[in-house]
Image (cartoon, helix red, strand yellow):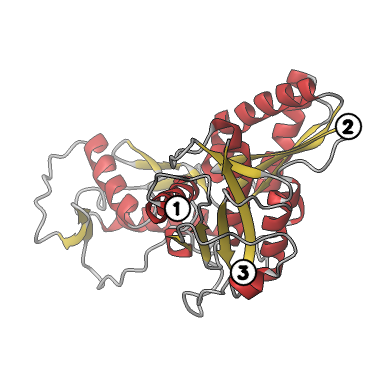
Amino acid sequence: MRLRPDNLVLVMLACLLASCGPAADPQERAGSVCVEVPNGQYFQFVDGRLVTTSSVQISEQERPPETARRIGATLAGMGYPWVSLEWDGQTVTVSGMALDENSRSDAFIATKSAFEADPVAGPLVQRVINNMDIRETEDAIAIRLTEELVEEDGLTWLRVKIDGKVATLEGTARTAQEKELGYGIGRSTVLSDLDASLIANIVVDAIRVADNGDPIGQALLDLSKDASVSDCQSAFNQVMDGREVEFEPRESVVRKASSRLLDAVTGVALICDAHAIEIAGHTGPAEFNVDALDLSQRRASSVRDYLMAYGVSPDALTARGYGNIGPIQPGVDANLIFPNTAFVVSARDS
C-alpha cells in the first residue's frame, strides 16, 4: 500500500481489554435484571426506580388495561421492554419476540409472578397464556433475506451474511452496474427488515465484480466474533489495501465516495471492539496554511464519531491527531514508528 505525504493515517492499536468478569454467556440472560424481592412484598418500577407498594398508590378500581400497562412498565424496568400484555380481568396473554428460549422462559416467569403478586390483579388472575415467539437466529434471517432477493428481485447471485451487528452483502456480479443495483436492493432489504434491523447496525459491501480484485468488505466474510488481535489487524489491512479515505480539502468532512470504505472499517471494528482501537490522524505538506495538529485531531475524531454512530463501543476507541508528523513511508516497518500497530489506513485530500 502506497502512502502519500499528504495523507491522514489511522492507526488501530490492538490491545486486549479486560473482560467484565467471570459471568456466563451474556446472551444467556439477555435483558434480565436480578432483583431480590422479599416474600409477600410487591414491587413496581416508577420513574426508573424499584419501589414498594407502600410508596405507590394503586387504585383498587383500576381497569384491566391500566393494570396491564402498569405491570408492563414494571417488566420493562426489569429488562423485558419487548413484552406485550393483554389482561381481561381473568386471563393474561403474554406476547413479544424473545431473543432466545431462555429469555422467553424468564419473561414468562417474571410476568406470571408479577400478576400473581399484584395487589389488584393477583386475586383475579386465573390463567397466564404464553404467546411469545423466539426471534430468528442470525443465520435464519440471512437465509430468509437471501431467498427474498432471489424470489422477489431475481438476484440469484447475491447473498446476505449477518454476523452480530454487521450485515454483509456478498456474491459476484457480471458488471459494475449489476453490482450497484444489487447493492442498493440488498442494503434496502436488510435495513427494512424488522428482525435484521434489530440486529445489524451496518451493511457492508463485499460484492465482487467478475475479473476484478477483492471488494471492500471481503475481509468481513471470514472474520469471526472471537477474532484475535492478529485476525483484526489482517482484516483492517485487507480493507485498506490500495484504498484511501478522502476528506474535503483542509476539512474534517469525509467525502461521500469514502462511505463504503468507512462502512467496511466500521464492520471490522464492530467485530473487533473487544480490542483497543486508536485512530491516529496525520497531515502532510499539502495541508499548508492550516493548523496541522488541529486538523489531524478533527479528522481522527470525525472517523471515530463515524464508527461510534454505528455502534462501535466508545470504550474501545480513542482519536489522536499527530499534526504534520509524517506518516509511515513505503518499505518502513510500521512498528518502528507506532509500536503495536494493528493497521494503518491512509486518507487524503483530492
Badge 2 or badge 3: first in the primary sequence: 2
Which residue was labeled with disc 2? Answer: 210
Q: Amino acid at mark 1?
A: Ser
Residue at the spot x=65%, y=48% of the render? Answer: 137
Q: Is residue 88 left or right of residue 189?
A: left
Viewport quadrant of the C terminus: top right
Q: Is residue 313 left or right of residue 157?
A: left
Q: Position of residue 40 (x, y in %)?
A: 23, 68
Q: In percent of the image, x 44 and y 42: which residue is there? A: 252
Residue 54 lies left or right of residue 63; in this view the side is left
Say what amino acid the circle numbered 2 marks.
Ala
From the viewer's perspective, is residue 295 above or below residue 148?
Answer: below
Query: Which residue is labeled 1 in the image?
Result: 296
Is 4 located above or below residue 232 in the figure?
Answer: above
Question: Is the residue 35 above or below the residue 106 in the image?
Answer: below
The residue drawn where x is 63% and y is 66% is 342
Answer with mark 2 or mark 1, whichever residue precedes in sequence: 2
Secondary structure beneath disc 2? loop
Q: CA distance from mark 2 to mark 3?
A: 34 Å
Q: Nearer the viewer, residue 108 or 134?
A: 134
Q: Closer to us: mark 2 or mark 3?
A: 3
Would residue 100 be seen by someone viewing this image from the given angle? no
Question: What residue would you read off at disc 3?
Answer: 341
Crowding at label 3, few (<14), some or many (≥20) Cα neighbours within 10 Å? Answer: some
In the rendered image, the vertical position of residue 234 relative to residue 135, given as above or below: below
The spot of residue 218 in percent (x, y) is: 76, 47
